[in-house]
Image: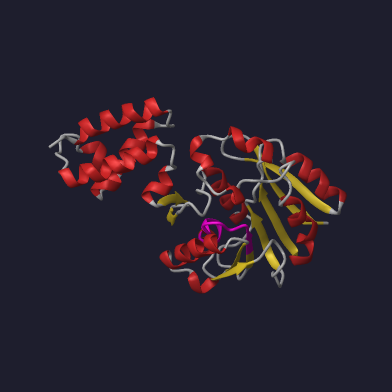
Amino acid sequence: MPLVCQLLQDAGARLEKSGSDEPQANAQWLLAEALGVSRTWVLANGGEEVPAPVQEKFLRMLARKEAGEPLSHIVGVQPFCGLDMRVTPAVLTPRPETEDLVEKSAALFERQGRYEFLDMCTGSGCIAVALANKFPRAVITAVDVSTQALQVAQENARLHRVEERIRLLQSDLWENVQGTFDLIISNPPYIPTADLAGLTREVKHEPRLALDGGADGYAVTRPLCEAADGYLKPSGWMTLELGEGQAWPLARGLAEIGWKAEVKKDIFNIERFVFARKN
């Protein structure tokens, strides 16, 4: 039987040849998944033998990764704000930038407060579930146009035992939304349509609905912002994640229609977030 270290070496070489990002790390995560152990165990037990059925499972997953499929789709989960989120091809893979949006938005509120939050374009529900986990007395409305995405969000809410405080709503933006909220938070589709062809193989496996921001990247963000003031409580916040170069134009546009908006950098020092309140 092959050893853990041998499989990792061979798999890392195959993934590097295929053009995969972080080939060694991906090989480690895949083998850990096949073995049903942690990545730390894999790194610490290179001399252990791998049974044939596990090797076969690992090689099947490796072939999917070589073809450019996202790691999250293969293993079915993605860490987010300290929680493992279920991920399928129907939803965008949660990213570190969005974790940063959640942390910065959460810092605006007291952890034991009674709040109504709205997560627009919820996708996997990662933002809604993370907020429900951080704010034990908050109720979150999670909105998406995709029924498939809402099914994943429901699974994540159940997985982390916050389903009683997350209201799932199928809606094309504000179409079916009612009420007012202390926070409207969103990671909307923001990639200009013309830029989609240049995305990496991994990102191209993700749902176009969660990526395509229309001709200028604001096709979803613009109508989201135009009506948002009618759904915010007087002291409420709207916090948004955008593409590189999009935050300042949106902040200026919000200022023109009566908002006080500021731009914040993400963990990679990119001006990505807009935090806004009504004057």
What x and y, as percent, mark residue 118?
64, 63
Magenta stretch containing residue 50, yes or no? Answer: no
Q: Nearer the viewer, residue 168 or 166?
A: 168
Q: Nearer the viewer, residue 217 or 184?
A: 217
Looking at the image, residue 213 lies above or below residue 271 = below
Looking at the image, residue 203 lies above or below residue 87 = above
> At 56% from the left edge and 51% from the top edge, which residue is drawn?
103
The span shown in magenta is 118-129
Q: Dividing the picture into quarters, in which one does residue 64 lie?
A: top left
Image check: 60 left or right of 231? left
Image check: 200 left or right of 236? left
What x and y, as percent, mark residue 41?
24, 43
Q: Quadrant of the N terminus?
A: top left
Can residue 31 be seen here? The reply is: no
What x and y, as percent, mark residue 68?
44, 37
Can residue 218 be seen here? The reply is: yes
Looking at the image, residue 182 lies above or below residue 265 = below
Q: How is the image coloured?
A: secondary structure
Q: Nearer the viewer, residue 18 or 121?
A: 18
Looking at the image, residue 154 lies above or below residue 56 = below
Image check: 190 left or right of 159? right
Q: How many marks?
A: 0
> At 26% from the left edge and 33% from the top edge, which residue is drawn?
8
What x and y, as percent, mark residue 237?
71, 58
Image check: 137 left or right of 16? right
Q: Dividing the picture into quarters, in which one does residue 236 lie?
A: bottom right
> At 32% from the left edge and 43% from the top edge, which residue is drawn?
61
Q: Quadrant of the C terminus?
A: bottom right
